[in-house]
């Protein structure tokens, strides 16, 4: 792995076997995250975003490929060795009401990682909890409250505080905005932006919310049926999406421009994503692609690097 990369996910595949059937969740996906960089992962539901993210931080062990973090291949570590690595990578899950222990106070939830990894003295840990609450915008009075007594946005702040307790280098944010009201989404997004700036955090940011991904991410990876079809710098991808799926995905998002002249028609995604039990031959997107040809039905396109350092898996780009 190049020293320039904090995380290097190389040709990772993950298959689940359910009721004697096989689901190919992720297939030969590769991405890299530099120190201080945020990589957004977008795509429709069922595209494999969360599975890829969990493989990247060691919550799932991939069937193929390598995941190198700080130069160490996580796929080769024992459970004990992996535990030592976990303090450097933390996760903020989609639903804080289920991710937090509802029987423990807010303070105890935030304290938990410090106890597990035996960080600091009792007094130091107590001080640390209140520091973290202040950093995420929670009043100290909530330390003795229980998570179910808080709003959804406040619970998500508790999740973020807990994830930051060990000063991780990488933060996986898995649909952290989707369960929140729009106004609360803006507050949590602003908090994550501040944390990136102040801490130099690296992030994997998984979301359906393309405007949020645009704001928070330096690089965007576009997934479909377990494969990364396009990846590049955020500004390049938004200005000129090259893969047909990226184009129709971006066109399907409601955009409210500053002027009427800049307004464009909203175009819903054509058709439906095929069943993950029955992956199409050739290009996985050819059943919905507006420019698909015979070769797309026969041959799997290989990812190619274009002149703007963009990676695209398409026969006709």
Image: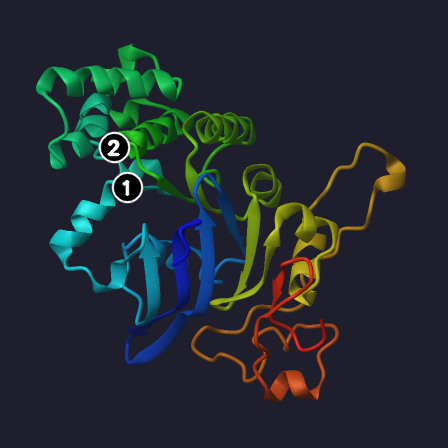
Quadrant of the rendered image containing residue 302: bottom right
Color scheme of the displayed model: rainbow
Q: Is residue 205 left or right of residue 123?
A: right
**Which quarter of the rendered picture does the N terminus lie within?**
bottom left
At x 34% / y 39%, what residue is drawn? Answer: 169
Q: Which residue is mark 1?
A: 88
Image coords of residue 20 (percent x, y): 28, 80
Q: Is residue 238 above or below residue 146?
A: below
Residue farthest along the right direction in this orientation: 261
Q: Is residue 220 above or below residue 26?
A: above
Could you classify mark 1 by the number of other residues whose Cα lies within 10 Å: few (under 14), some (14-19), or many (20 or more)?
Answer: some
**Which quarter of the rendered picture does the C terminus lie within?**
bottom right
Q: Which residue is mark 2?
A: 166
At x 32% / y 52%, what residue is drawn? Answer: 69
Quadrant of the rendered image containing residue 50: bottom left
Q: Is residue 262 above or below residue 112?
A: below
Quadrant of the rendered image containing residue 232: bottom right
Q: Mark 2 and mark 1 in contact (Cβ < 8 Å)?
A: yes
At x 52% / y 26%, what residue is drawn? Answer: 190
Q: Secondary structure at mark 2?
A: loop
How many marks the image carries: the answer is: 2
> Which residue is more in the foreground, 105 or 80?
80
Q: Is residue 93 left or right of residue 228?
A: left
At x 64% / y 73%, what residue is drawn? Answer: 314
């Amino acid at each position: 792995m190049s020293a320039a990369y904090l995380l290097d996910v190389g040709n990772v595949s993950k298959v689940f076997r359910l009721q004697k059937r096989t689901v190919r969740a992720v297939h030969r996906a590769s991405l890299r995250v530099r120190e201080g960089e945020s990589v957004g992962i977008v795509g429709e539901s069922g595209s494999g975003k969360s599975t890829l993210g969990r493989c990247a931080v060691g919550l799932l062990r991939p069937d193929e490929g390598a995941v190198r973090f700080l130069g160490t291949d996580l796929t080769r570590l024992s459970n004990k060795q992996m535990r030592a690595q976990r303090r450097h990578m933390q996760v903020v899950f989609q639903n804080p009401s289920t991710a937090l222990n509802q029987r423990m106070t807010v303070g105890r939830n935030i304290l938990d990682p410090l106890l597990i990894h035996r960080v600091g003295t009792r007094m130091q840990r107590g001080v640390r909890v209140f520091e973290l609450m202040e950093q995420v915008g929670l009043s100290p009075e909530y330390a003795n409250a229980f998570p179910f007594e808080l709003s959804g946005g406040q619970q998500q702040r508790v999740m973020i505080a807990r994830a930051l307790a060990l000063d991780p280098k990488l933060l996986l944010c898995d649909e952290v905005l989707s369960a929140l009201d729009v106004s609360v989404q803006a507050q949590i997004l602003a908090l994550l932006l501040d944390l990136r700036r102040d801490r130099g955090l690296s992030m994997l940011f998984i979301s359906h919310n393309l405007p949020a991904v645009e704001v928070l991410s330096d690089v965007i990876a576009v997934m479909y049926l377990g494969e990364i079809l396009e990846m590049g710098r955020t500004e390049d991808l938004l200005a000129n999406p090259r893969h047909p799926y990226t184009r129709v995905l971006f066109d399907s998002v409601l955009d409210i421009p500053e002027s009427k002249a800049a307004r464009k028609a909203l175009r819903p995604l054509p058709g439906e994503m095929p069943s993950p039990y029955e992956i199409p031959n050739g290009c996985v997107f050819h059943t919905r692609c507006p420019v698909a040809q015979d070769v797309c039905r026969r041959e799997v396109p290989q990812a190619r690097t274009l002149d703007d350092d963009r990676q695209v898996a398409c026969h006709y780009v």
